[in-house]
Image (cartoon, rainbow, N blue to C red):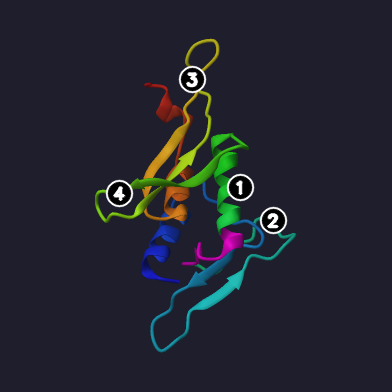
Amino acid sequence: MNEDTYFIGLDAVNSPNWKWMPGMLYVVNRPAPLEPVVGRVPDQVRGWAPYPGAVPNFDDPATLGCLLALVRQVVGDPGLHVRLTNTARKSDGLRAWEVQGRIRTPQGPVGHTRTFLAWGYATEAAALVDTLSFSTEDETSL
């Protein structure tokens, strides 16, 4: 796991909406000469938490899929998805990742819908982790 992925994982576990899900790959960095501890959250275990200091490894496809499922739960949109846009970011010229989904807020009788929840991220995981902290209370001022 590279340093950028580590810090994205650290942001994820510090989110108030974070929870570990079965199948997630985690890493615990330890000081040299010790090797990092790597493991997977076991199936069928509720309330399980890995070692203190563990962060999810979003380079692992299963862990990234669990993050997507978690973000869908938090936002309340089972159709929420992430895509790589054709627009280059100004900071580094890389194509930007965005999160698209629909949310309902308590505005008016029908509520408010929004399709772009996050945009301009270097990685799929970064876009999802930022959306993980999303709250419909943030939208009441729109």
The residue under label 2 is 46
The CA distance from mark 1 to mark 3 is: 23 Å
Q: In the rendered structure, which amino acid carries the disc numbered 2? A: Arg
The image quarter in which residue 142 lies: top left
Viewer-proximal residue, 4 or 32?
Answer: 4
Specify the farthest residue to the front: 86
Q: In the rendered structure, which amino acid carries the disc numbered 3? A: His
**Left or right placement of residue 53 versus residue 63 in this view:** left
Residue 39 locus on image (x, y percent): 59, 73
The residue under label 4 is 89
Q: Earlier in the sequence, mark 4 or mark 3?
A: 4
The residue under label 1 is 69
The image quarter in which residue 38 lies: bottom right
Q: Earlier in the sequence, mark 2 or mark 3?
A: 2
In contact (CB < 8 Å): disc 2 and disc 3: no
- The residue at 62%/69% (across/down) is 40
In contact (CB < 8 Å): disc 4 and disc 3: no
Mark 4: give few (<14), some (14-19) or many (20+) Cα within 10 Å: some
